[in-house]
Amino acid sequence: MSVSNVFVGSDRILCLTDTMIYRGNMPVGLCERKCFVSESGRFAFSMRGTHALLQVLGPVLARVESIEHVDIVIRGVPERIGDEFFEASGGEITLMCWSANKQAPQSTRYKLRAGGVPVQATTMEPGIHLAPRMAPGVRLPAHADEAMMVKMALGQHKVQEKFSQPMCIGGVMHLTEVNEHGADQKIAGFYPDYSEYYDRFGCPHAAEYRSRTATASSFG
């Protein structure tokens, strides 16, 4: 279950994603990212599903210039990609952009399934949308800033550890912001067990981790 936590606000969208690669319920590596900023800088999209699907679709969607074209490409994915690229539960793409017509941020979550099943698209309402979801009854705040996005992601990770639920959450926390000026992304932090998986699998962001660790140590 890849992390794709989204906050849709009145003037921006925040999206926090992880980088854990898993097979079944077992971690098998750390990828570069699961949320991409388009080459045009106009929109961003996160992906949940197999690493193979991410590798194939990520670069393709990032090169698309218009939001309208991205929507067309996503809706055509099940007909163009073999079933082997999908998990049993399918795949998921969350598209985030600024709507010039509405003068507000806009986010659409697409559910993809194998077998040529039509893509299901849902417009995300204002507020916080966690994926994977927290347990029923957990109350979420109405608003989120960068610190809250990190806090919620760490909460998901803690649930995984406490109840031994195989969510396969971990690696790097990327925070992506989309507003009227475009899309931007940064590393918001590292999950608590990052070093364990970095030692096992390596990581494209290892240099950044070592730099931050060294800086923290120098002030310790």
Image: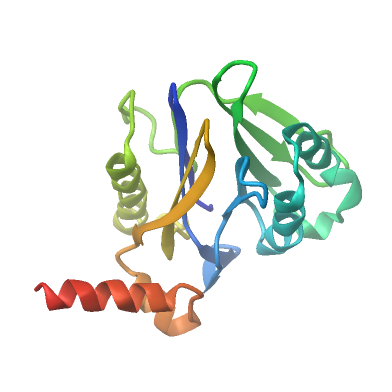
Residue at the top extreme, as displayed? 102
Q: How far from the left and from the top, in percent, is residue 192?
A: 29, 65
Residue at 43 percent of width and 25 percent of height: 9
Residue at 32 percent of width and 59 percent of height: 161
Seen in the image, is 178 located left or right of residue 143? right
Q: How far from the left and from the top, in percent, is residue 185?
A: 48, 52
Q: How far from the left and from the top, in percent, is residue 135?
A: 38, 36
- Residue 198 position by quadrant: bottom left
* Position above or below: 199 against 43: below
Residue at 33 percent of width and 53 percent of height: 163
Q: Nearer the viewer, residue 95 or 154?
A: 95
Q: Nearer the viewer, residue 6 or 157?
A: 6
- Residue 186 position by quadrant: bottom left
Q: Can the viewer see residue 115?
A: no
Seen in the image, is 81 located left or right of residue 9? right
Seen in the image, is 115 located left or right of residue 50? right
Q: Quadrant of the C terminus?
A: bottom left
Label total for image: 0
Q: Can the viewer see residue 10?
A: yes
Q: How far from the left and from the top, in percent, is residue 28?
A: 55, 73
Colouring chosen for the image of the structure: rainbow
Q: Nearer the viewer, residue 161 or 216?
A: 216
Residue at the left extreme, as displayed? 220
Residue at 56 percent of width and 68 percent of height: 31
Residue at the front extreme, as displayed? 181
